[in-house]
Structure formats: structure tokens, C-alpha cells
Amino acid sequence: MDWSPTSLPIAVDAMGGDHGPGEVVAGAVLAAREHGLPIVLVGAPGPVSAELARHGASSEIPIVRAEEALEMDEGALASLRRPRSSIAVACHLVRRGDAGAVVSAGSTGGVVATGRLRLRGQPGVLRPAIAVVLPTRPRGTVLVDAGANADVKPEMLVQFAHLGAAYADVALGVRRPRVGLLTIGSEPGKGNKLIRRAHELLSAANVDFAGNVEGTDVMAGSVDVIVTDGFTGNIVLKTLEGGVRYAFGELRDTLSEGRLSRLGAALQRRRLRELTRRLDPEEHGGAALLGLNGTVVIAHGSSSAAGIAAACRLAGRLVEKRIVERIGERVSADARSHRRWS
Amino acid sequence: MDWSPTSLPIAVDAMGGDHGPGEVVAGAVLAAREHGLPIVLVGAPGPVSAELARHGASSEIPIVRAEEALEMDEGALASLRRPRSSIAVACHLVRRGDAGAVVSAGSTGGVVATGRLRLRGQPGVLRPAIAVVLPTRPRGTVLVDAGANADVKPEMLVQFAHLGAAYADVALGVRRPRVGLLTIGSEPGKGNKLIRRAHELLSAANVDFAGNVEGTDVMAGSVDVIVTDGFTGNIVLKTLEGGVRYAFGELRDTLSEGRLSRLGAALQRRRLRELTRRLDPEEHGGAALLGLNGTVVIAHGSSSAAGIAAACRLAGRLVEKRIVERIGERVSADARSHRRWS
């Protein structure tokens, strides 16, 4: 192949997601046509080529064959049982240097396990972690880990700070991201044992550590990166999702009480819908699985074509800005500075 | 004293809260006059009696002297340093049988530490925990622990289920509350080590265990009680608070774009304000500290007079429905059934 490194294609897992290949292929076509991204689709050639033909895109996007697929309800173990799954083959393309990144709308557990198995952690990184961008003002906030590691050690939280800082730099353009540690109470001694130790380590680490942040700060935009374990991070993310859905449901009821209010509600229904979508953190490009020898973006399982295209755009940006190298630099710089002082 | 047990007064900590005694005394007067609750105010006689006089209530509500007060920013250790603080004296009244319950708008850490020290845990209860009622539909959901215990063991989570079930029974009138365990992923094996073990124990415990729930379920009203550790619970609660504030802020911006929308927004501003208030979980009576030899209700530090009155009403209800005995019955029944089977 004679692609230059920056034009390595994005390997899109055509079999992941709740809607089957239809929506994923449509998203891949959108990414190729609207955003000019080089794409390969990985999956069962029959259905995938049929979908491509529907868009008249058969000659535009190559297909790489994968015999199997991980089901959405299959857990992490399935990645061992299915070495030829579409997500495994997509990872293999990156490993071999034939693709620059993987995009999948498969189950998070399956993508994380397959990514760890096929791409391996990058040197010096203890554990890969999931980063998502929360739509705070004036700019987004990176939450890491959003669900890859349910049990962590304090040293891993320090590394999540590096992963998140590299991601904030690359994805949000923040040169010196401020990092907060999610806990209960803002003073240094507050939290559980894990957090108290992580606070000490972060204070000595090579990051712009802003100290503790609380749940009320998650959507406040007061820091650029919020560090937490994958258990808490996933619960926070899903609590926000459910909380916003609840608040808007209540609001709809409130707005439709009374005649004048009904008028107002009708005027605003469309705006309300747009806002709901914008608040869904999984709508803007998906979650990045960071710390592996390759770039993996996990799109929401129920992603529309536009969601898949956004995930491809995010993956393209992460490759272009060399996220893997940037993480490597931060992690090894921190390790060096620790050696120097200890 | 010749009060009957049900008419034991509620000892209100006049010195707790962000607004000083003014708002607390106003709330106590409201509780006494509007809801007919017997109240004693605990605090510095000078300021408290001045506030009572402002309401013309000097002869209606007795004052019990307390020389000191815990500051809002003082942590748990202050409860040891200040044995004569208003919250400590209020607890002492309950201990001595001169009051039925304590209401305080002091710092959560200070109230929890003082309560543990002065009232002690009730027999068989490993750790007291904080329960709050989330305003879900069709009826509220109890979240426990909302912040008393940052580091827990699986056995404590089982007890939190009993505390929460007793509370749902007493506060929400749910005879057989369904209990969910907060984690990531709905299948039994999902979560961290703590949760996996707690899941096993809860499956064997004497509660109506509905299995795992996720962050998206917190505001869905699908279970009556959500069990979690105090670290996660507090972060969930504060994330919801911040998330709802954020969503409404975005909404305000959205609603005020465009001329027709501005009209609609004007119509709805008041309703929106009401809704925001209703969604604040700390506005309806506050948090209950369960598992002590006495009833303690923690009102929000920034409580208005109405918030303090609501906390007094909740405290009165918990005493009337004998929450302490109900918790004792559940915890000992579970201990007995375990002895029988093991």
C-alpha cells in the first residue's frame, strides 16, 4: 500500500452497533464523502457490500472480510472466543500498519477487551482508559476513566490524568489542561483511601493539578480533565444521561400545563430536542479508548449515521495529532521526573 | 417531664447552616405554628431569643443553651474538640430522652461525626448511613449511602439495604421496597470487587433485591431503594444537582433565543423556577442519618425557613413511625435468618 502515514484509512467495524451494518455503512459513506476521510469497512462482505451499493459507494470504500461479529450483549470474554470478529480484524489492521485507527459502535466491554488483547497497552501505560468529552462551557471537559477499569490503584489514576491531558490537548486544543480529581469534599484529605493516595501522587506528578473536584463540578467547566476510576466515571456519565432525560421529561410536563404555556412549548419543542441531543455525551464522536498501541474510538451502540461519521472524524483527528505519541511523551516524562527526584 | 413518647420535641440545632440562626429559627417557628410540631431550639441564648422575639414566639419555643457551634467548614474532628456544640447538645437531649429527634443544617461531616459520637450506632448496625429521597416518578427513590461512609465493606452495603428499606417504608409508605445495587452493567457479574461480593450477599439477604441498577436508572424510579457506598452516592447526588443546574442553564439560553421563544420563556420562567427547586433533592426535608440510637435529619446548609420546617416535619414522621425500631427489626431479622441457614 502506498498511503502516506497521515492518510492511513480508518477501519470501521461494520458489524458493531444496535442497528446492524445499515447505519454504520451510511455513517462511513458520510465520513468519506463529507469529510474526505479514507475509510475501510470491516465485516461480512455480503451485507456490507449490499449497503454500500445502496449508497452507490461500492467503488469508494474497500471492504476487509471478517467472518464473525461480537454481539452487543456479549461481554469481555467473547473477544477471546472470537479472534476473527470484525473488531478484532479492525484492530489487526492497525497493528499491521494498514489502518490508522479503529471506530466501533460495538459493546464497550467487547471493544475494550479486544483492543487490549489485539493492540496491547502502549509502553509505560498501566491500563488503557476511556475518555469522553462532556459538553461543558466555555469548552468541553474530559472525563477519564469513563468505564474501562472498575478496580484501580492510585498510580493508575495518575496515568489517567496524563491520558486525559493528552486528549484535552489533542481533541479540545487546550495546551496546558487543568486536571481535577473527582471526590467528595474539596479539601485535600477528603475522599476514600484510593483518592487520598492519588491526591498525593498527583500533587507530585508532572500535570497541572487543580486539586479535588466534586460532583457539582462535573458539568461546571471549572477544569479541563476530571480524573476518576472507571466504576465511578461510568456511573457519573450514566447518571448525567438519566438526570438530563428526567429533567427534560419533567420540563415537558411543566411546559404543557396551561394554555399559554402550551403555546410556548410548541415554539420551543425543536430547540429542546436539539439541546437534548447536544447534552448526550455519546453523540459527539464517541468515547476514546486511550493508552493502547493504536487509536480506538467507541461510538454509542445506537449511533445514527451522523454519529458514526462524527466518530470517524474524531478518530481522524486523534491520528493526525498523534495521540499515541503524545500520551507516550507525557507518561515517560513523568516517569523520568520521578526517577530524578526519588 | 410528662410528654408522651410521640410528643417528645424535636431538637433543632439553631447554630447550624450558612445563614446563621435567623433562617433556622424562622423555620422552627414555622414548624411549630403551621405543622403543630413540638420544638426546642439549641444554641446561644442571646441571638436565638432575639430571633424568636422577632417572630413573637418567645413563649412558644423553649431554648436549650449550647455555648459553642461547629463551623460549616469544620470537619469531623471538630465534634471531638467541641463537646458542648449545639449539635452535640441536641444529640445529648435525644440520648437523655428529652427530645425525639435532632434537626441540623450544619456541615454533613460534623453532624455525622457528632451523631456517631453522641448517639452511637444502634445494636447490630455496622455503620450509620445517609439516606436521601430522589424526586422520581411515580414515587420517590431512596439513595443510601449518600455520603457518610467513603470506604465500605460488602456487609455494610447489605445493611444499607435494610436502612433504606426501613426508610422507604416509613418515609414513602412502601411496604415491600424493591432494592437495587448501583453498579456499571446490569448483569450480576458487573461492577468492581466490592459490588460483586455485595451482590452475592444481597441475593441471600432478607430484602426484595431487584439486582443491579445503573446510573441511567437513578432517576428512572424503577426501584424504591438504591444501595451504594457513600463515596459513589455523594458523587451521584452532586452530579445530579450540577447536571440539572447545567441543563436548565442551557435551556434558559435556548429558550431566550429568538423573539417568539422569548415570549414563551417569559410565560414559563416561574414554572421553571419551581421545577428547579423540586429537583433539588435537599429541598424536601433533607437527608436522614440512619442507624444511630436516635433520629437525625440533616437539612441543607443553605436551607430557607421552609426547608428547615420540612426537615422538622420529616424528623417528626420518622419518630412517629419509629424508624429506629424498624431498622433494628430488619437488621436483626436478617442476622437471625443467616444464623439459621449457615
Image (spheres, coloured by chain):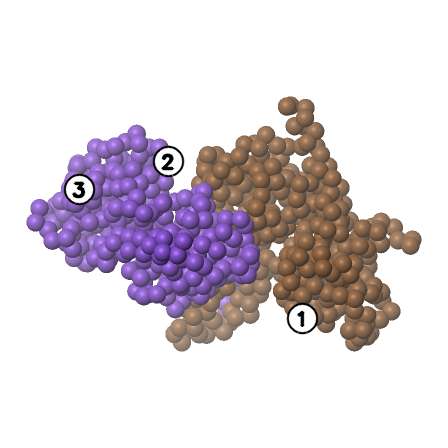
Chain colours: A purple, B brown
Viewer-side residue, B67 vs A33:
B67
Quadrant in which residue B114 is drawn: bottom right
Which of marks 3 and 2 precedes in the sequence? 2
Q: Residue at x 83, y 63 (%)?
A: B64
Q: Amino acid at mark 2?
A: Gly
Q: Is residue B34 left or right of residue A29?
A: right
Marks 1 & 3, CB-CB < 8 Å contact: no
Whole-percent x, y for residue A49 in the image: 16, 41
Label 1, on which residue?
Answer: B19
Point out residue B286 in the picture as x, y percentages from the top left corner. Answer: 65, 57
In the visual, does A20 lie left or right of B99?
Answer: left
For marks 2 and 1, give the CA distance: 52 Å
Q: Residue at position x 45%, y 54% from top?
A: A201
Residue at point 23% right, 41% down? A91
- Name the subunit of mark 3: A
Where A150 falls versus B40 (above or below)? above
Q: Chain of mark 2?
A: A
Q: Is residue B342 above or below residue A132?
A: above
Q: Which residue is mark 2?
A: A75
Image position of B99 with respect to A68: above or below: below
Q: Are marks 2 and 1 in contact (CB under 8 Å)?
A: no
The residue to which callout 3 is attached is A96
Residue count near mark 1 (Cα–Cα under 10 Å), binned few <14, some 14–19, many ≥20: some
| Mark 3, other Cα within 10 Å: few <14 / some 14–19 / many ≥20 | few
* x and y, in percent, of residue A19 in the image: 30, 43
